């Protein structure tokens, strides 16, 4: 990158900082800081919902997945669309009308305070790892695109994003996400246009070349998609098993629910969530197609530049750093930074919300005024942001050199840890019998078994002998549900009013 590219990058960073500080100037209490005063309209929330989940990981991993293996994994996006009506009008509506700061408040009503604190701790660990993986993805790109060391990239982006998150709160996060969404989608359109302009047949030519080389969709019996083999990397049956959990997980995810709670009413929530979910699949396919463009560029247009040993993640970032003209490189790197910042800011804010509302305000410093809690929220955001930089460096040390594609790093790190909480919420929402003691026993069994299978069945195995990573995500959910329910059956006992917080109680009593 030259001076023009760096100038574009610096201008973009300062624009987001100024926008965040300006929008966040209206904070008067913790509702303003964490829920944007519950005054947001649906369309910026819809964009923010998408942008916060579509991170730097996706920015690199989706094109890298298409380059390496094709587009079959994109079919997983259908689960959200299929699950949307039940997720929105059953589970999310249930939580929205409870008017929660954190979703863990529900667990205290359903079980007891110990489960609220337990899942709050799980959430903070999960989101710290999530931040670490995002910083890992960012370091991967900037190391290849700019020659920066991963340490410098992680610290620079982490510190910068933490500052504007501290200044702006949730309302600033939502509006900066809107700007960042425009930049990152514009960046991928630039890649597609740049390659299609040179490719014979344009966009159709890219698709035809990718199809000839097995990089589009392959649902034939020989693809392994229909196999029940646990070693199969992508299985239709594992995707199908995830549909029921897609009905619950978005409604119980603090980062997602917190954005929904910023809307002025549930009608706005329904519009925001529907737009975000329905737009997710076509936009993801756009990023997969960008990976096909990179594949066509190196394999067809410029085979002299191809390195057969190079993976798709690296090919994508090297294309940005060496093949794009001056100016476009800076814009594409700004798109990557937009992707990472749109996720980092929301996660920092949601971790701070859980810490303040689940631990600090009720346990460590009860009875203080709102000015104190706003100040504590800002300090918590600063501390969380800086700590996440250290987690990012740790993730880099764990995964670098292990020949694990970024999309699998994401699923293993986040899917496995997130599955513990998902199992707890499923049992809480769907079963009358499960109690707090059963939850603790289920987790005590689930965590060591899952970690052992992940470490010895995946991380320490050669690539061709690893257990399918989609299986590793579903295992802890089913294990937690089964053990917690069976343990609760034998232990017995539950508060009578806890039945009101089982989802079935809305329609009938046991």
Image (tube, grey):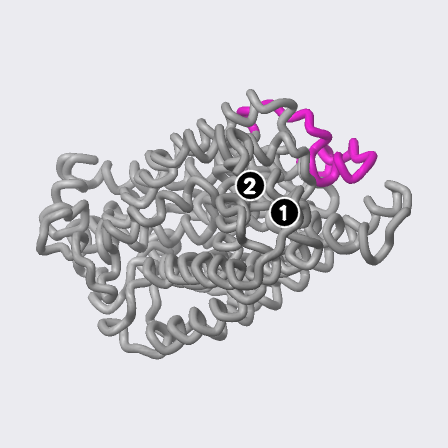
Image quarter of residue 184: top left
Q: Is residue 318 above or below residue 33?
A: below
Q: Is residue 230 left or right of residue 226?
A: right
Q: Main secondary structure of the magenta part?
A: helix
Q: Residue at x 70, y 33 (%)?
A: 36
Q: Is residue 174 left or right of residue 235?
A: right
Tell which of 279 and 194 is nearer to you. Answer: 279
- Where is residue 19? Give x, y as percent: 67, 35
Cβ atoms at labels 1 and 2 below 8 Å apart: yes
Q: Residue at x 56, y 48 (%)?
A: 341
Task: Write down the residue under mark 1.
Answer: 110
Tell which of 300 and 500 is nearer to you. Answer: 500
> What is the spatial separation of the Cα atoms under label 1 and label 2, in whole angstroms?
8 Å
Magenta region includes residue 509: no
Q: Is residue 425 visible?
A: yes
Q: Residue at x 47, y 42 (%)?
A: 248
Dot 1 lies on which element? helix
Q: Residue at x 37, y 52 (%)?
A: 320
Quick one: label 2, few (<14), some, or many (20+) residues within 10 Å? Answer: some
Task: Write down the residue under mark 2.
Answer: 502
- Where is residue 386? Give x, y as percent: 68, 61
What residue span does the magenta drawing correspond to?
19-44
Q: Is residue 335 visible?
A: no
- Where is residue 222? Give x, y as percent: 9, 55
Dot 2 lies on which element? loop
- Where is residue 108? Give x, y as percent: 68, 49
């Amino acid at each position: 990158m030259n001076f023009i590219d760096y100038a574009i990058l610096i201008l973009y960073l300062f624009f987001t900082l100024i926008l965040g500080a300006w929008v966040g100037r209206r904070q008067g209490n913790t509702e303003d800081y964490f829920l944007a005063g519950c005054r947001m309209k649906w369309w910026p929330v819809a964009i923010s919902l998408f942008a916060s989940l579509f991170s730097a990981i996706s920015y690199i991993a989706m094109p890298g997945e298409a380059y390496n293996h094709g587009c079959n994994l994109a079919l997983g996006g259908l689960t959200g669309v299929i699950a949307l009506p039940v997720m929105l009008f059953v589970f999310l509506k249930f939580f929205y009308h409870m008017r929660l700061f954190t979703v863990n408040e529900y667990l205290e009503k359903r079980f007891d305070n110990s489960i609220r604190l337990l899942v709050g701790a799980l959430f903070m660990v999960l989101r710290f790892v999530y931040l670490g993986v995002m910083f890992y993805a960012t370091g991967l790109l900037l190391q290849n695109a700019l020659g920066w060391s991963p340490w410098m990239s992680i610290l620079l982006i982490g510190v910068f994003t933490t500052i504007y998150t501290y200044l702006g709160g949730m309302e600033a996060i939502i509006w900066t996400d809107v700007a960042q969404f425009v930049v990152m989608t514009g960046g991928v359109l630039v890649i597609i246009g740049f390659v299609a302009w040179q490719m014979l047949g344009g966009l159709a030519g890219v698709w035809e070349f990718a199809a000839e080389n097995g990089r589009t969709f392959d649902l034939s019996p020989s693809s392994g998609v229909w196999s029940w083999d646990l070693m199969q990397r992508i299985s239709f049956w594992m995707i199908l098993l995830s549909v029921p959990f897609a009905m619950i997980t978005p409604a119980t995810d603090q980062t997602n629910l917190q954005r929904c709670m910023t809307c002025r009413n549930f009608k706005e929530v329904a519009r925001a969530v529907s737009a975000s979910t329905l737009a997710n699949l076509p936009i993801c396919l756009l990023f997969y197609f960008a990976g096909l463009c990179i594949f066509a560029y190196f394999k067809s247009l410029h085979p002299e530049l191809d390195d057969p040993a190079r993976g798709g993640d690296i090919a994508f970032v090297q294309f940005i750093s060496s093949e794009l003209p001056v100016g476009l490189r800076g814009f594409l790197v700004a798109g990557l930074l937009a992707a990472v910042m749109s996720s980092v800011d929301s996660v920092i804010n949601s971790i701070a919300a859980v810490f303040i509302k689940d631990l600090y305000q009720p346990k460590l410093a009860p009875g203080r005024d709102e000015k104190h809690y706003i100040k504590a929220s800002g300090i918590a955001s600063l501390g969380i942001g800086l700590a996440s930089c250290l987690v990012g460096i740790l993730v880099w040390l764990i995964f670098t050199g292990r020949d694990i594609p970024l999309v699998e790093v994401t699923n293993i790190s986040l899917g496995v840890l997130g599955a513990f909480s998902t199992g707890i919420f499923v049992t809480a929402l769907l079963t009358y019998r499960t109690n707090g003691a059963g939850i603790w026993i289920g987790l005590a069994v689930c965590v060591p078994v899952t970690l052992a299978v992940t470490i010895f069945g995946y991380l320490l195995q050669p690539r061709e002998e690893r257990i399918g990573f989609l299986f590793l995500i579903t295992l802890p959910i089913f294990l937690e549900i089964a053990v917690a329910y069976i343990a609760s059956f034998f232990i017995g006992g539950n508060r009578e009013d806890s039945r009101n917080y089982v989802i079935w109680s809305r329609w009938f009593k046991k």
